[in-house]
Amino acid sequence: MKRVWWVFIVSLLVTGSAISTSKVSTSSNNEAETIIHQYINYITSKKWNEYVDLFHYDSEVHEDLLLYLNDQKNQFNREGIHGIQDMKLVSMEVTSDLEFSSKGDEVYDVLLDMKVHKPSEFYENGVSRHMFVFNRTSEGLQLETVYYKGVVQEN
């Protein structure tokens, strides 16, 4: 009888552990998706302070990036990120790409559909692939970096 109780208790613990793990994954995925939507919103609405705050940068990098983003010449010339007219999330999934999966606590393979004023090295018209690398910090999930992987070729 004791053995039956132990089997029952162990199975409850294993089941409870599996359920809580799946909730963490789903919750984490939702948190990452929220941040990716904020990333898109901040770029398309030119909210540069909020955009930079999404990243886990030290204060010097934070300031340098803000100087670039707020530079009126770059904005006027639509240089780099300033050339983005519109951007939409197409899809996201936890990456299976071994090159990136070890770079952060959570790494997502993300497809973004972009419309740009003038194509550049990292911003082109069409659906492009990006790797969003997140790490957990004392403030929660934060972006470490986003890798551009190129425009997705249609079949």
Image (tube, helix red, strand yellow):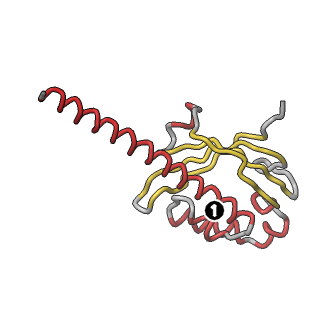
Q: How many marks are shown on the rendered structure? A: 1
- The residue to which callout 1 is attached is 38
In this rendering, is residue 107 above or below 62? above
Instruction: Kindly indicate the quadrant of the structure image that contains residue 110.
Output: top right
The residue lying at 72 percent from left, 69 percent from top is 46
In this rendering, is residue 126 above or below 139? above
Q: From the top left corner, tell me how far across and down residue 38 is, in percent.
A: 63, 62
Comparing 1 with 51, the one in front is 1
**Quarter holding the N terminus?**
top left
Q: From the top left corner, tell me how far across and down residue 130 is, in percent.
A: 67, 44
Comparing 48 with 21, the one in front is 21
Q: From the top left corner, tell me how far across and down residue 24 is, in percent.
A: 43, 48
The residue lying at 75 percent from left, 40 percent from top is 150
Q: Secondary structure at mark 1?
A: helix
**Quarter holding the C terminus?**
top right
The kind of residue tagged 1 is: Gln
Would you say 24 lies left or right of 6 here?
Answer: right
In this rendering, is residue 7 above or below 86? above
Q: From the top left corner, tell me how far across and down residue 101 is, in percent.
A: 53, 37
The residue lying at 49 percent from left, 44 percent from top is 104
Comparing 75 with 2, the one in front is 2
Would you say 18 lies left or right of 75 here?
Answer: left
Would you say 85 lies left or right of 129 here?
Answer: right
